[in-house]
Image (cartoon, helix red, strand yellow):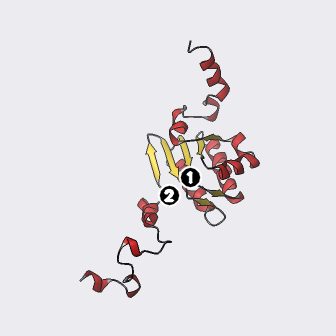
């Protein structure tokens, strides 16, 4: 009965072992609750998981999703780029625009980047000197939230550790 309702094109795709390699089972997860990318809320912090590639085709959507988290009252927005392997200039521009909006609204945007290719793009463009870049989501959530001038610089943390915790 179920097979009769399937379209003829799907008849060949009877199980996971016969799906073509480009078929992505996680595709449906990206559109839960009308959002394009998964957002995890932890209090007033929003962790937005970004796609594997950020280029001219989706940079606007990335910017819109990060701004949507800001507009919903997030004090801290974490752009989780752990799975992002490619980010071109349009993606970097989108991140900078969101960063500027976060500063204007009194919020903080932090990036989580673990791939060398994206780290290199951020380094070449100088974005890593303007925005906070962390190796993992847990590290990005560990610092104090709030205005960027309230975030403790790395030198202050090193000084606090150098005096033996006193």
Precedes in sequence: disc 1 or disc 2? 2
Q: Label 1, on which residue?
A: 66
Furthest residue toward front: 17
Residue 5: % across, % down: 30, 84
Spatial separation of the CA atoms under disc 1 and disc 2: 9 Å
Disc 1 + disc 2, Cβ < 8 Å: no
Q: Helix, strand, or loop for circle 1?
A: helix
Q: Quadrant of the N terminus?
A: bottom left
Residue in view at x 60 percent, y 60 percent = 53
| Residue in view at x 71 percent, y 45 percent | 127
Q: Residues within 10 Å of mark 1 (few under 14, many from 20)?
A: many
Looking at the image, residue 155 lies above or below residue 116: above
Q: Badge 2 is on which residue? A: 37
Q: Residues within 10 Å of mark 2 (few under 14, many from 20)?
A: some
Q: Secondary structure at mark 2?
A: loop
Measuring from the top left, give residue 88's x and y in whole percent. 69, 59
Name the quarter where the C terminus is drawn: top right
Front in this rendered view, residue 115 or 139: 115
What is the tally of numbered marks visible in this picture? 2
162 up-or-down from 66: above or below = above
Q: Is residue 151 left or right of residue 142?
A: right
Residue sitting nearer the eye, 118 or 12: 12
> x%, y% of residue 154?
65, 29
């Amino acid at each position: 009965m179920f097979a009769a309702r399937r379209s003829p094109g799907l008849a060949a795709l009877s199980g996971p072992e016969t799906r073509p390699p480009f078929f992505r089972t996680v595709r449906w997860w990206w559109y839960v609750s009308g959002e394009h990318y998964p957002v995890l809320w932890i209090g007033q912090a929003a962790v937005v998981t970004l796609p594997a590639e950020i280029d001219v085709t989706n940079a606007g959507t990335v910017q819109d999703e990060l701004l949507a988290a800001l507009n919903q009252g997030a004090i801290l927005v974490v752009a989780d780029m752990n799975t992002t392997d490619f980010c071109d200039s349009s993606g970097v521009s989108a991140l900078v625009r969101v960063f500027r909006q976060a500063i204007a609204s009194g919020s903080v945007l932090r990036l989580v980047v673990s791939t060398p290719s994206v780290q290199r793009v951020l380094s070449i463009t100088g974005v890593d000197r303007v925005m906070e870049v962390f190796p993992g989501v847990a590290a990005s959530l560990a610092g104090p939230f709030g205005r960027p001038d309230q975030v403790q610089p790395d030198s202050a943390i090193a000084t606090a550790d150098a005096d033996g915790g006193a």
